[in-house]
C-alpha cells in the first residue's frame, strides 16, 4: 500500500502515519519528493487497510500496490509454475494438455465412441457435461447421475481422466465420485460457495472465465479454491462478451500472456464456445497453442448434426486426429511438450 500525503503535510503528520503502520507490524518507507511525500507500507495489506489511514491528518489518498489475490499470484510460487498431474498426464509448466469430448453426455454409444476417438488421437483428458448450464430452462439439462456413470465407463475404456461440470453444491458427492477435474462453468465463476465446495473436494478444478469477468475477477475466483488448500486449479479462457456479434463470444487471446505474467496457474483455452462454429475452432486453437496456452479444451461429436447441445461448434470425430496433431505442433512452437502421457 502507498500512502500519498497532501501537499504541505507536516513532519508531525508524516510521523503519525509511520507510527501507525509500524504499530501493526508493518514497515514504512518514506519517500520525500519536492512537493509530495509518499509512504510505502510493506507487510500485510489487510492490517494496513484496517488502520483507516484515508482519514488521518495530512493524508491525501491510498494506492494499493499489491494485487488483491495472493495464492494465485506469480510471486506466491516465486516463479515456479503449477503443473496439474493426473496419473502422469500433465498440464502446466512445459506440459501441454488437450482436453476433448462432447459438450454433453447424450448416451452410451455417443460417449464411448467420442471418448475412444479422442483417446486414440492423443487427447490427455476427456470432457463431457452431465449437468448443463443452459440459457433456456426448456433446453436439455443433462443426464445427471446417468451421465456421470457413462463418463466413468468411458474412463475405464480409455484411461482418460474425466473433466465434468459441477453446477450445484448438492451434486458434489456424485460428481466427485467420477470427476478427476471439476469444471466450474463461466456462469458460476463468481458462485463463491460453489468454488469453496469444489476446493474442499481436493480434486483439480478447471475454472472458466465468466462471460464479462476481468482477469482480476477470474484470479480472485481462483483464490476461493486455492484458499481451501487445493493447489490444482487451471484457468480457462472461453470467450467474453463484447460489442462484436459475428461470433458467439470474443476469444481473448491476450489473456494468455497476461495471465502468464500475473499467475503461476495453468491457462487453458476453449475455442469452441467462443467461436460457436466448427470451422473457426482450429485457427483459434492453433493461435492459442502458439501463444503459450497450457492446454486446449475442445468439443467433439460423432454426429455433430444430431448433437443435442452445441452441435455447430463440435469438431467431427473423423477429422479430430489431424486437428490434434496440428495443435500439438503449435504447442511445440511455443516450447511445450505435447506428448500424450
Ligand atoms: C462447457 O464447457 O460445457 C460450458 C458450458 O462452457 P461455459 O461454461 O464456458 O459456457
Ligand atoms: Mn458446449
Image (cartoon, grey):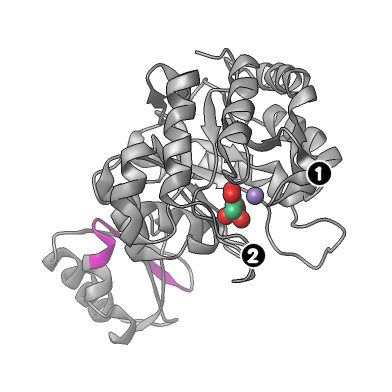
Q: Which residue is disc 1 drawn over?
A: 305
Residues shaded magenta: 36-46
Where residue 71 sits: x, y (%)? 33, 46
What percent of the width, then of the height, locates residue 190? 45, 65
Q: Is residue 30 visible?
A: no
Instruction: State the mark number for residue 114.
Output: none
Q: Is residue 69 left or right of residue 121?
A: left
Which is more toward the observer, 24 or 179?
Answer: 179
Using the image as rendered, state which of residue 81 and residue 242 is in the foreground.
242
Residue shown at 48%/44% (left/top)? Answer: 147
Element class at badge 1 = helix
* SS assignment at label 2: loop
Percent coordinates x, y for residue 266 in the rendering: 49, 35
Which badge, 1 or 2, comes first in the chain's sequence?
2
Marks 1 and 2, how far apart at CA? 17 Å
Q: Against 313, is 242 above or below?
A: below
Q: Can you identify the residue that label 2 sits on?
A: 139
Amino acid at each position: 500500500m502507498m500512502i500519498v500525503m497532501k501537499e504541505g503535510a507536516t513532519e508531525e503528520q508524516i510521523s503519525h502515519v509511520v507510527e501507525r503502520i509500524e504499530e501493526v507490524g508493518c514497515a514504512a518507507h518514506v519517500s520525500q519528493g519536492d512537493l509530495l511525500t509518499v509512504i510505502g507500507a510493506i507487510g500485510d495489506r489487510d492490517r494496513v487497510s484496517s488502520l483507516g489511514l484515508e482519514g488521518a491528518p495530512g493524508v491525501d489518498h491510498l494506492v494499493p500496490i499489491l494485487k488483491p489475490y495472493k495464492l494465485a499470484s506469480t510471486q506466491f510460487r516465486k516463479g515456479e509454475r503449477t503443473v496439474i498431474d493426473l496419473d502422469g498426464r500433465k498440464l502446466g509448466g512445459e506440459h501441454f494438455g488437450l482436453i476433448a469430448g462432447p459438450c454433453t453426455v447424450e448416451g452410451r454409444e455417443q460417449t464411448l465412441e467420442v471418448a475412444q476417438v479422442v483417446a486414440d488421437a492423443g487427447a490427455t483428458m476427456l470432457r463431457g457435461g452431465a449437468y448443463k448450464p443452459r440459457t433456456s430452462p426448456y433446453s436439455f439439462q443433462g443426464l445427471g447421475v446417468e451421465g456421470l456413470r457413462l463418463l466413468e465407463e468411458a474412463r475405464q475404456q480409455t484411461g482418460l481422466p474425466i473433466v465434468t461440470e459441477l453446477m450445484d453444491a448438492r451434486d458434489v458427492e456424485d460428481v466427485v465420485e467420477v470427476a478427476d477435474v471439476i469444471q466450474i462453468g463461466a456462469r458460476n465463476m463468481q458462485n463463491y460457495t460453489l468454488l469453496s465446495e469444489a476446493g474442499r473436494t481436493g480434486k483439480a478444478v478447471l475454472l472458466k472465465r465468466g462471460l464479462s469477468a476481468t482477469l482480476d475477477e477470474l484470479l480472485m475466483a481462483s483464490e476461493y479454491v486455492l484458499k481451501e488448500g487445493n493447489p490444482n486449479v487451471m484457468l480457462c479462457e472461453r470467450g467474453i462478451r463484447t460489442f462484436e456479434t459475428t461470433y458467439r463470444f470474443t476469444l481473448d487471446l491476450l489473456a494468455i500472456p497476461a495471465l502468464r505474467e500475473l499467475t503461476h496457474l495453468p491457462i487453458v483455452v476453449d475455442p469452441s464456445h467462443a467461436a460457436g462454429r466448427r470451422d473457426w475452432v482450429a485457427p483459434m486453437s492453433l493461435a492459442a497453442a502458439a501463444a503459450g496456452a497450457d492446454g486446449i479444451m475442445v468439443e467433439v461429436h460423432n454426429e455433430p448434426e444430431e448433437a443435442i447441445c452445441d452441435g455447430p461448434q463440435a469438431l467431427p470425430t473423423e477429422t479430430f486426429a489431424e486437428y490434434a496433431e496440428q495443435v500439438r505442433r503449435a504447442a511445440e512452437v511455443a516450447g511445450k511438450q505435447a506428448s500424450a502421457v
